[in-house]
Amino acid sequence: MRKTWTLLIALLTALLLLVVSWSSAVGQGSAFATNTPPPPPAFTTNTLVPATPEPTLTLEPTLTPTSTLTPTNTPTLTETPTLTPSPTATIVGPVIYPEGYSPLTGLPYPNEEARSRRNLIIKISNFPPQVRPQSGLNAADVIYEYEVEGGVTRFAAIFRNNMPHHVGPVRSGRLVDLELAPMYEALFAYSGASAPVQDLLLHQPWSLQVISPSIGDNCVQAGFCRFPGDNLAFEHTLYADTELIWERATARGINEGRRARGFSFSDQLDPNSLPGEDIFINWYGHTDARWQYDGETGHYLRFTEGLPHYDAADGQQVWVDNFVIIEVPHEERPDLFEPESSSASQQINLWDSGRAYLFRDGRWFEGYWRRRDREPGSALELFYADNTPMMMKPGRSWVSIVRWLGDVVVSDQQADMQATGTALAASFTPTNTITPGPSHTPEATLYPGVTLMPR
């Protein structure tokens, strides 16, 4: 029995050892299975470590174009300021003008010749009615209209962009021209002047810029030629060739491009405007002018004494992009006319500042005008009460000088000028005929009611 229990215990002990040994083996097998997954990622990671910089390097060139694109955007940004003053300039003036842009129009000069030559002012008659239609008005960059005496007006046309060969009739200088010529550092062309005004003109610091028959500039050398016409007094028969005037200035060594700072231009309208469709000015019942906005062209068209005012050179109604009216003090100067004259010359105080209207794009803007000083090249400025510039439309401008803005009537409705013209035409038919005369530039333009004879 004892042997039986001893044998049984031995068998159980062996069996127990066998179980323990098997469990240990199984346990070790589970540990390897558990630890096996971590090494593959570790090995995979370690295997790719040498390759990892390669993708990193391939990504860096990918990022490099991104930084390369930054300069690609930069030219776009740098071109924007260059493109800003486009043919309809965004902002030009009143002091800084982009290279190659005219302070008279706010647009690029049409060619290098226009950019290089000097501003040229030519005095043009507007009375009596027989002098109409004048020639060359639509070729001027800027025109000033002002009262001479007796309630009639005269024009000071400033040329730069264009070179018309038949401008006039050319008339005499006035006291206000002593302000206009230095304002625009311009050549000054006129037929003559009263003795006191002539003396003042010839004693200005800029007197070398005067070009006139009154100082010996004739038809052949300077382009001042006579074209006699029916019902025209001798003083209304003088016309000018701008090409020869500029050649005369070149011969004197004074035909150089000069800027006149003052006007501001933008193709965007200023805020706070009123309708400005029809503007009427009456100079004391002696002369009147009406401007109406033409929406199709964006121009203001001129009527004088109830009739469309034409340019004989191109056959078109007189037009501008901007119509400006400035209120300026006037003083009578009887000492500047000959004793036998029945009226006094006007001193128009075109310095300091005053009220102003600007009309563009069918809108009416109210503000002020000023000259910062009376130095050469310091021209007319238009600004608002907060001292910001009034933005004119890039293009041609007309400035009418009045004693008082109360002489101006502005309306958002256009007067029926066709009916007015029909009524006037029924009572008056122009018979003005310009006969042949000396000229260097033939023209064959016809104007309704006026025959321009071949030259």
Image (spheres, rainbow, N blue to C red):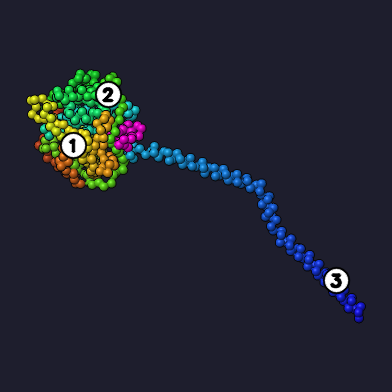
Q: Secondary structure at mark 3?
A: helix
Q: Secondary structure at mark 1?
A: loop
Snapshot quadrant of residue 360: top left
Which numbered circle lies on residue 14? 3
Snapshot quadrant of residue 278: top left
Please report contact status of discs 3 and 1: CB closer than 8 Å, yes or no: no
Please report contact status of discs 1 and 2: CB closer than 8 Å, yes or no: no
Query: How much space separates mark 2 and mark 3, taking CA atoms?
Result: 132 Å
- Residue drawn 7% across the image and 25% down it: 340
Q: Is residue 296 above or below residue 343?
A: below
Q: Secondary structure at mark 2?
A: helix
Q: Residues within 10 Å of mark 3 (few under 14, many from 20)?
A: few
Residue 91: percent from left, percent from top: 33, 39
The magenta-colored residue range is: 92-109
Residue 304: percent from left, percent from top: 16, 36
Query: Which label's residue is closer to the chain start, 2 or 3?
Result: 3
- Residue drawn 58% across the image and 46% down it: 59
Residue receiving disc 1:
328
Q: Please indicate, yes or no, whether residue 130 appears anywhere in the rendered image.
A: no
In front of the other: label 1 or label 2? 1
Residue receiving disc 2:
246
Q: Please indicate, yes or no, whether residue 206 appears anywhere in the rendered image.
A: yes
Query: How much space separates mark 1 and mark 2, taking CA atoms?
Result: 31 Å
Please report contact status of discs 2 and 3: CB closer than 8 Å, yes or no: no
